[in-house]
Amino acid sequence: QVQLVESGGGLVQPGGSLKLSCTASGVSIRMYFINWYRRAPGKEERELIASVGYTNDRTNYQDSVKGRFTISRDNNKNAMYLQMNSLKSDDTAVYFCNMFTEYDEFWGQGTQVTVSS
């Protein structure tokens, strides 16, 4: 059974940093593309905020997080990360890791990030 387990969320003040981790079990992440999504309070849809290809030199970011967030993967640890710096109140959301191929797709359970003073 494939599971993605997230950790690292919490309460942080504006301007602070958090690093989210997502560890996979039951499958190797090596052949998967990886994304981080978030769902803001009161919204139903998740928005894609960061993506990484097979290697860490191929990344893409939503404009709202570009320059502040960094997505990465460690295939040896079977894990993916989202380093979030200069956090703003607008970053408050539930964050989800996601990985997919053309054959299947898996999601983490979500972790709450709250940016507030």
Image (cartoon, helix red, strand yellow):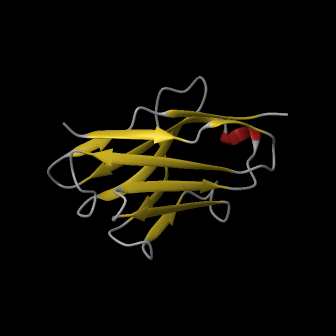
Considering every residue shown, the one lying at the far right of the view is: 117
Considering every residue shown, the one lying at the far bottom of the view is: 57
- Residue 10 x %, y %: 65, 35
Considering every residue shown, the one lying at the far front of the view is: 77
**Relative vertical location of residue 90 with respect to residue 83 in this rendering, above or below:** above
Relative to 16, 97 lies left or right: left
Considering every residue shown, the one lying at the far top of the view is: 42
- Residue 29 x %, y %: 28, 57
- Residue 57 x %, y %: 45, 76
Residue beneath the point at 43% across and 72% down: 56
Quarter of the picture containing the C terminus is top right
**Relative vertical location of residue 25 with respect to residue 68 in this rendering, above or below:** above
Residue beneath the point at 46% across and 37% down: 46
- Residue 81 x %, y %: 49, 55
Q: Nearer the viewer, residue 57 or 1?
A: 1
Residue 67: image quadrant is bottom right
Residue beneath the point at 26% across and 63% down: 30
Quarter of the picture containing the N terminus is top left
Residue 85: image quadrant is bottom right
Callout count = 0
**Relative vertical location of residue 10 with respect to residue 78 in this rendering, above or below:** above
Relative to 91, 106 lies left or right: left
